[in-house]
C-alpha cells in the first residue's frame, strides 16, 4: 500500500465529475486551461508525479521516460490505445501502464456506421447545399449514393469494436467479411454470419466498404498502403476510426483524387491534427476531429476506469487494466 496521498498529474481537462472525484482521493494537479503540454512540460510532470494521467495527444517516448523521476510508478492512460507510450521502456523502468479498454466500444461502432452512411449517402454534400441556400428542389438524379443492403463490409480487426461494428452492419443488411490476427470462434462468426479471410489482400479486392478497427502497432503501420489500395474496387469506401497510421494517408489521398477509391470517412489521421490539405478539397471525403468516442457517458466511464486503476495501485494491488508490452 502506498503511504500518503498520491501526487497525480493530469495532462488534459477531464469531465468535471471525474476531476472532482480525483481531487477527493488524491493530491491532484489539473490542467485547467486544457492546453496540450509541451515535451518539456510532460517531462517535468513525470519528474514530480507519482501517477501521470496522459491521453492520446501526449507522446511519451523512451528518451522522455528516461528523464522521469524516481517517484513515477504509474501511467494511468485516459484512453484505450497506448501506442503513444513506449510501454517497453516504461516496463523496464518499473513504471506500470494502464488503459481504459472496453469503454468506447459502442460509441466508436456507432461512429463507424455514421461515417459509412455519411459517405455512401453523400450526407455532407446535401447538407452543404442546404446550408448555402442553393437547393433548387428535388431531382431524379441528384445526390445519388449507394444502397447499403447487400454490400460487403470488410472489417480489419475483429476485436471488441470490430464485433460491435459487425453487429450493427448485420442489422443494415451488410455482408460481414473480416481479417484478424486470429480467426474467431465459429459461434461468433455464426452470430454475425461473418466470413473470415486469412489473406487481407483477397478480402480487400472483394469488399465494397472497409472499416479499420485494428490498433496501431509496428505490424499494422501502413497496413493499407498504395499496393493494397489498388486492389480495391474503384467504388469502395474506406472508414477509419482506429488509428491514422494504419493507412498511408498520402497514398489514400492520391487514390481518392484519381478515382481509384470511391470515398473515405476518417476520424483519425496519420499525423494527428496535421491533415493532408488535399483531403479537405475532396467532396467524397468526410473528415471528423477524432470524435468517435466523444460521448458524455463514454468520457465519464473512461475517467472511472482511470480512477479505479489508480485507487487499486494505491492500495498495493495490481491495477485491473494493466498493459504489458507482450500484450501489444
Image (spheres, grey):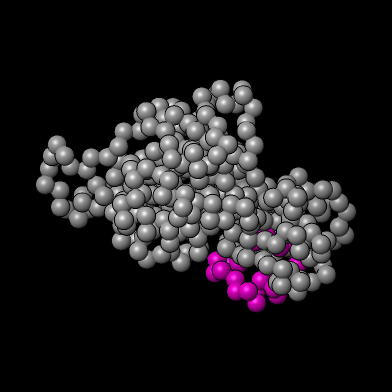
- Residue 10: percent from the left, percent from the top? 65, 63
- Residue in the foreground of this view, choosing between 176 and 79: 176
* Residue 78 sits in quarter: bottom right
Please tell me whether residue 41 belongs to the stretch shown in magenta: yes
* Residue 8 sits in quarter: bottom right
What range of the chain is rendered magenta? 30-54
Please tell me whether residue 43 belongs to the stretch shown in magenta: yes
Q: Residue at x 88, y 54 (%)?
A: 1
- Residue in the foreground of this view, choosing between 291 and 299: 291
In the rendered view, tell whether residue 30 sits above or below residue 284: below
Q: Does residue 118 appear anywhere in the picture?
A: no
- Residue 270: percent from the left, percent from the top? 50, 60
- Residue 121: percent from the left, percent from the top? 30, 41
Q: Does residue 226 appear anywhere in the picture?
A: yes
- Residue in the foreground of this view, choosing between 184 and 319: 184
The residue positioned farthest toward the left in the image shown: 136
Callout count: 0
Q: Is residue 274 left or right of residue 90?
A: left
Q: Residue at x 56, y 69 (%)?
A: 36
Amino acid at each position: 500500500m502506498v503511504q500518503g496521498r498520491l501526487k497525480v498529474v493530469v495532462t488534459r481537462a477531464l469531465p468535471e465529475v471525474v476531476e472532482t472525484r480525483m481531487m477527493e482521493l488524491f493530491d491532484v494537479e489539473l490542467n485547467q486551461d486544457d492546453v496540450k503540454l509541451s515535451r518539456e512540460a510532460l517531462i517535468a510532470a513525470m519528474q514530480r508525479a507519482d501517477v501521470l494521467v496522459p491521453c492520446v495527444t501526449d507522446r511519451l517516448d523512451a528518451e522522455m521516460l528516461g528523464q522521469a523521476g524516481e517517484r513515477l510508478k504509474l501511467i494511468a492512460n485516459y484512453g484505450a490505445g497506448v501506442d503513444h507510450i513506449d510501454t517497453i521502456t516504461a516496463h523496464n523502468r518499473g513504471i506500470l501502464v494502464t488503459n481504459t479498454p472496453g469503454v468506447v466500444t459502442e460509441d466508436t461502432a456507432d461512429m463507424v456506421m455514421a461515417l459509412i452512411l455519411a459517405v455512401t449517402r453523400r450526407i455532407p454534400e446535401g447538407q452543404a447545399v442546404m446550408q448555402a441556400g442553393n437547393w433548387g428542389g428535388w431531382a431524379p438524379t441528384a445526390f445519388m449514393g449507394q444502397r447499403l443492403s447487400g454490400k460487403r463490409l470488410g472489417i480489419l480487426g475483429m476485436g471488441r469494436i470490430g464485433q460491435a461494428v459487425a453487429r450493427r452492419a448485420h442489422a443494415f443488411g451488410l455482408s460481414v467479411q473480416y481479417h484478424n490476427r486470429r480467426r474467431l470462434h465459429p459461434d461468433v462468426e455464426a452470430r454475425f454470419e461473418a466470413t473470415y479471410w486469412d489473406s487481407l489482400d483477397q478480402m480487400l479486392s472483394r469488399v465494397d466498404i472497409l472499416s479499420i478497427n485494428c490498433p496501431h502497432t509496428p505490424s499494422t503501420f501502413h497496413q493499407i498502403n498504395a499496393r493494397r489500395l489498388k486492389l480495391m474496387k474503384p467504388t469502395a469506401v474506406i472508414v477509419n476510426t482506429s488509428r491514422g497510421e494504419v493507412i498511408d494517408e498520402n497514398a489514400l489521398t492520391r487514390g481518392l483524387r484519381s478515382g481509384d477509391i470511391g470515398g473515405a470517412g476518417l476520424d483519425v489521421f496519420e499525423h494527428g491534427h496535421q491533415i493532408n490539405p488535399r483531403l479537405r478539397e475532396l467532396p467524397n471525403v468526410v473528415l471528423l476531429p477524432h470524435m468517435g468516442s466523444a460521448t458524455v457517458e463514454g468520457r465519464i466511464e473512461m475517467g472511472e476506469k482511470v480512477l479505479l486503476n489508480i485507487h487499486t495501485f494505491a492500495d498495493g494491488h495490481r491495477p485491473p487494466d494493466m498493459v504489458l508490452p507482450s500484450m501489444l
